[in-house]
Amino acid sequence: MLPTVDTDEQWDVVVPDEAVMRPGVEDLCRRLGLASAPLHRFTEGTQPVYAVGDDLVLKLFPGAVAHDGLVEERVLSHLEGRLPVPTPRVHAAGTYENGWRYVLMSRLPGEDLAEAWPRIPRADRERLVTEAGEALAALHALDPGPLADVLGPGDWGAFLRKQRAGAVARQRERGLPESWLEQIPGFLDAVPPRADAPRVLLHTEFMRQHLLVGSVGGEGRPRLTGLFDFEPAMIGDRAYDFVGVGLFVTRAEPGLLGRFMGAYGHTFEPRELLAHTLLHVYSNLPWYLRELPAPPEPTLDALARTWFDAGSG
């Protein structure tokens, strides 16, 4: 009952329209034996995602990104019970009508860490950052080999070269001023990411918005209760995951990135992480400049130190 969505134009018409989506989701739930469970659509995220009752989440993938549904299913199944932070357990997954895929998974307890963060005392923030660093280390320690048939990019060196070739155009499209754009080629020439770095399983969007925390505001101390959203997962250099860490977990808060890296077990140089930031698939430097502390001078070297200095504070 869900219509075909193979183009951006079809996506814009179908996916945001609950009057179109709801009947198909209800039909799929009936097929999964969940006809009586109440449905609630989450407002966050790119894909249509629904709470099914209190314990399940149904995530749908239109034909245009159906492969992402397969990635989510396979990665979650690979991770089940293997990280110090819980990940969703797959209950069912497969194809629906007109090219759609779905993953029915367990609903993790807790609150979005990004929403909870302002209420968390500094000492508890430090402990949560330590937990997050340990979780990412555990993720990167897993053998990604069983997922190589579904996860890209295959040739990491070729991926880096492609991202390097489009780095300036990518930021220009996002509105980065020319004074910053003209620095990018020289910066990337001086700090080339390693094409031969060991390959690990990457989340690629390791950020507060994809971490859950429990017991905030209660009697117990807050703990991480979940890590989710693995559809963009890749296999590549572990430094690539630290883009999300620096920009969206520690966010230049003094001392936190160093604490995260200490828990992770490895320290990365600031310029290396900014280089990966410029090469990241979702890189948007103008947005980051609006959201994060400004550097003391308008140079990429200063920006790297401001956002990714593990020793600050």
Image (cartoon, helix red, strand yellow):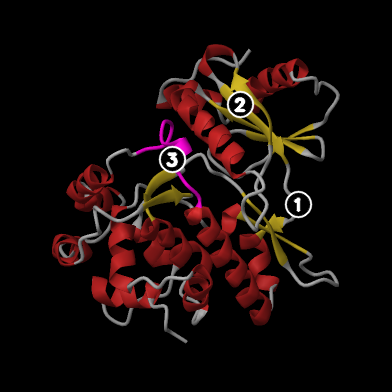
Q: Residue at x 48, y 55 (%)?
A: 140
**Magenta residues, start to end:** 142-152
Q: Residue at x 55, y 15 (%)?
A: 3
In the foreground, 251 or 174: 251
> Where does residue 259 sit, x and y in percent of width and height?
52, 77
In the foreground, 191 or 36: 191
Whether residue 298 is visible: no
Q: Which residue is mark 2?
A: 102
Quarter holding the N terminus is top right
Location of residue 95 by image quarter: top right
Q: Residue at x 41, y 43 (%)?
A: 234
Label 3 Cα crowd, 10 Å radius (few <14 / some 14-19 / many 20+): few
Q: Nearer the viewer, mark 1 or mark 3?
A: 3
Secondary structure predominantly adopted by residues drawn in magenta: loop
**Could you tell me which secondary element the residue under label 3 belongs to?**
helix
The numbered mark at residue 145 is 3
Q: Amino acid at mark 2?
A: Tyr
The numbered mark at residue 261 is none
**Could you tell me which secondary element the residue under label 2 belongs to?**
strand
Q: Which residue is mark 1?
A: 109
Q: Residue at x 62, y 67 (%)?
A: 131
Q: Amino acid at mark 3?
A: Gly
- Distance Cα–Cα, label 3 vs label 2: 24 Å
